[in-house]
Amino acid sequence: MMSASRIAFLTGAGISTAAGIPDFRGPRGVWTRDPEAEKTSTLSWYLRDPDVRRRAWRTRAESAIWERSPTPAHYAIASVEKAGRLQGIITQNIDGLHQEAGSDPSLVHEVHGNAREWRCEDCGETGAMAAMIARVRAGEPDPRCPECEGITRATTILFEEMLDPDVLDAATAAAERCDLIVAVGTSLFVQPVASLFPMALDAGAIGVIVNAQPTPFDDMAEVVLSGDIQDELPRFIRSLLS
Ligand code: NAD
Ligand code: ZN
């Protein structure tokens, strides 16, 4: 494990909680506190119910991800790339903090899209998320497309939607080619991304899990670190690189 030279990371919302962005399924997660919130991530609910959209926009305005800074764990992952030992970063996160920490964007596979932009559900117009959030904060709870008055949304992938096949292919290739896969801050519940972890092990990689709560794959992992990610991951990476 210590000599691994093609390391892949599979990251989830838990790596960004220390940046002030809540996760979904952790003890203080958005869905743990209110299961109804799951509707904001489900396409049919989002399109059908204006209350769900208002809630989604309110949550986006509150989490203000483009105002957040990367955590020590994001920087630790970036240091693996600088050491020439990174295969790729597969992330379920939509916050862009890996790139912000200095990771090469071409090695960051954002399988659930990102929230840097909004898109019109009707005409496909896109624009910067920050500008749309400014409208929400100025008193438009369900802001409409400036071109066609259509429903607007983030450029993230919702439940009931297909993943981008090119991004999924790149993520799958990273999982199949790595010799060590480190899952960080993910409950490993969301498919098909979660299955990349056992896929990497089947292809010969060693598995490490860094997460406070148990995951369905803990038994398969060589090492499970269940302390705080912001302590555990930088320490683990320092020992790998030393
Ligand atoms: P999740 O909410 O299902 O799981 C997060 C896990 O991280 C939990 O098991 C929690 O116990 C653990 N965790 C949180 N903070 C931790 C810490 N400091 N130390 C140790 N463990 C910690 O997250 P997921 O698996 O990524 O799935 C949620 C979905 O929601 C993803 O699809 C993702 O796209 C999206 N999401 C993204 C963001 C983001 O971009 N930052 C935030 C919320 C949700
Ligand atoms: Zn439009």
Image (tube, grey):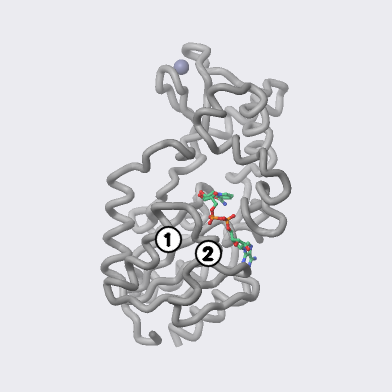
Q: Quadrant of the C terminus?
A: bottom left
Left or right relative to 69: residue 4: left
State the image coordinates of residue 215 (x, y, percent, origin top left): 53, 67
Task: Kindly identify the residue that appears in the image at 44 percent across and 71 percent down.
Answer: 182
Task: Establish whether ligand 1 lies closer than 8 Å to the Cβ of label 2.
Answer: no
Q: Are marks 2 and 1 in contact (CB under 8 Å)?
A: yes
For the residue with label 1, is its CB less than 8 Å from the closest atom of ligand 1? Answer: no
| Camera-nearest residue between 187 and 74 | 187
- At horizontal 60% and vertical 55% (from top left) the residue drawn is 69
Which residue is disc 1 drawn over?
A: 103
- Establish if 97 lies above or below 86: above
**17 or 163, which lies in front?**
163
Q: Residue 38: where, in percent of width, then height?
A: 61, 41
Q: CA distance from mark 2 to mark 1?
A: 9 Å
Q: Which residue is mark 2?
A: 74
| Above-or-below relation of 45 to 111 | above
Q: Secondary structure at mark 1?
A: loop
- Residue 89 occupies quadrant: bottom left
**Element at label 2:** helix
How crowded pointer 1 is (Cα within 10 Å; few <14, some 14-19, many 20+) is rated as many
Q: Nearer the viewer, residue 201 or 110?
A: 201
At which x and y percent is residue 86? 35, 70
| Residue type, numbered disc 1 | Ser
> Which residue type carries mark 2?
His
